[in-house]
Image (spheres, grey):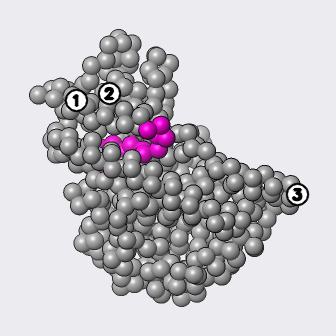
């Protein structure tokens, strides 16, 4: 074209979680039965929204207003309900005007990074959730800036690493927390969160806390929401209903802004986020309208507790199976839907394979693994040999070789079979070139 129309950050827009699907679909065409363990969609894995929640939604459909536009920030009644819910935790106090609704957190993440000054950087955890790291890198036209999560310490963040990077990189303007974390399933202990807030306060930063999995907690670690520990530091919490109702297709998420008036630049930035949302008029109305009725129903807490008990049981079984495998580190998750496994140093190489009897599948994989990272090579061979589709950790902006797998399979026997198979195939793979 006459001029270069490609954004300088276009190459940063990668999403391996869905990128792996193209290979899986090709393998499916070659006759491999795929077990989708790559993406956190509870509905796709057999979860059904409780009947009582469906009834609330059905009744709301009779309200003609649910088909129309709503205010740009979101429905007033729902924002008041959510503000009261946050204020009850005795931390940061907000009003309905400190809440803005978006079409899912993907929309919110895009707006948060797009409206930053191009020179302002957000440092986030590594392994990094691709939607955040890609959006931040694309906004800056540069590689994402991250602080390390340590697999040998149950994926806890390296606070010294975070502090040093903040201290010596004046472009860093904010710190991202994902709590519970995706892709690791780690939950930030309250003490660690308080240390991060202290760093933000010392260096005059703001904090973003992605809390989409805030109600998917099943470990023993005591954590806290950003609102409870933020103090006077400016911050943004990101929340939604896709994982806990579960209703991922609702595309309904929101941000809560804390201490917006404590810093003039932060206040102007938040206004720019709202203004950019105003250009779209508003977010979807129906999902917003049912939130107060569902979350205030006494059955809601029971619904969450029952689901978390299932995840806890699966996390314990998965950890039991994988922690005994030589050559890997497999920390037990405490929240969210995921477990991330890291291969020990130097155990992977470009000669390792798994037996595949179908010649067409084997030939396809031999072509696909040329030049890919070694953890991606394992993921491809695992999928070709067993149909189990996971995501390589190299797809999460990290040098740590490994893979992420979900805890969402709702059939207990199938779940056990998947992790027994993965455990066995890791052993076979690591021995294949020795």
| Label 1: how many Cα within 10 Å (few below 14, some 14–19, many 20+) | many
Look at 36% across and 79% down and name the residue there.
194
Q: Position of residue 139 (x, y in %)?
A: 50, 59
Between 83 and 370, the residue placed more toward the observer is 83
Looking at the image, is 64 positioned above or below residue 48?
below
| Label 3: how many Cα within 10 Å (few below 14, some 14–19, many 20+) | few
Q: Which residue is mark 1?
A: 429
Between 65 and 379, the residue placed more toward the observer is 65
Q: Position of residue 411 (x, y in %)?
A: 47, 37
Q: Which residue is mark 3?
A: 64
Mark 1 and 2 residues: CB-CB less than 8 Å, in contact? yes
Asked which secondary structure carries label 2, the reply is helix
First along the sequence among labels 3 and 1: 3
Magenta part of the chain: 395-412
Q: Which residue is mark 2?
A: 381
Between 269 and 380, the residue placed more toward the observer is 380
């Amino acid at each position: 074209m006459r001029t270069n129309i490609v954004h300088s950050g276009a190459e940063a827009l990668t999403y391996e979680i869905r990128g792996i699907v193209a290979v899986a679909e090709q393998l499916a065409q070659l006759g491999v039965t795929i077990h989708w363990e790559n993406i956190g969609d509870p509905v796709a894995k057999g979860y059904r929204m409780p009947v009582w929640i469906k009834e609330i939604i059905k009744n709301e459909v009779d309200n003609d207003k649910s088909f129309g536009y709503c205010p740009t920030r979101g429905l007033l009644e729902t924002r008041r309900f959510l503000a009261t819910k946050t204020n009850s935790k005795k931390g940061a106090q907000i009003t309905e005007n400190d809440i803005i609704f978006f079409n899912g957190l993907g929309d919110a993440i895009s707006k948060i990074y797009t409206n930053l000054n191009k020179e302002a950087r957000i440092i986030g955890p590594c392994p990094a959730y691709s939607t955040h790291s890609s959006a931040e890198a694309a906004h800056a036209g540069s590689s994402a800036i991250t602080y390390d999560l340590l697999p040998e310490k149950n994926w806890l963040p390296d606070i010294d690493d975070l502090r040093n990077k903040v201290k010596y990189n004046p472009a860093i303007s904010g710190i991202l927390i994902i709590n519970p974390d995706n892709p690791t399933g780690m939950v930030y202990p309250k003490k660690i969160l308080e240390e991060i807030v202290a760093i933000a306060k010392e260096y005059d930063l703001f904090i973003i806390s992605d809390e989409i999995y805030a109600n998917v907690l099943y470990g023993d670690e005591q954590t806290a929401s950003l609102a409870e520990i933020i103090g006077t530091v400016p911050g943004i919490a990101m929340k939604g209903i896709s994982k806990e109702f579960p209703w991922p297709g609702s595309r309904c998420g929101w941000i809560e802004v804390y201490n917006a008036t404590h810093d003039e630049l932060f206040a102007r930035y938040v206004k720019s986020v709202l203004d950019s949302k105003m250009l779209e008029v508003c977010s979807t109305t129906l999902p917003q309208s049912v939130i107060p009725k569902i979350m205030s129903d006494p059955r809601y807490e029971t619904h969450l507790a029952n689901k978390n008990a299932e995840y806890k049981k699966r996390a314990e079984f998965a950890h039991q199976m994988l922690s005994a495998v030589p050559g890997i580190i497999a920390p037990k998750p405490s929240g969210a839907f995921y477990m991330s496994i890291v291969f020990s140093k130097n155990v992977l190489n470009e000669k390792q394979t798994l037996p595949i009897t179908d010649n067409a599948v084997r030939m396809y994989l031999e072509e696909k693994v040329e030049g890919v990272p070694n953890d991606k090579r394992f993921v491809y061979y695992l999928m070709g040999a067993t149909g189990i589709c996971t995501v390589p950790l190299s797809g999460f902006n990290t040098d740590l070789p490994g893979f992420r797998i979900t805890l969402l399979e709702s059939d207990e026997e199938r779940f056990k079979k998947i992790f027994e198979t993965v455990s066995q195939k890791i052993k076979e793979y690591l021995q294949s070139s020795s």
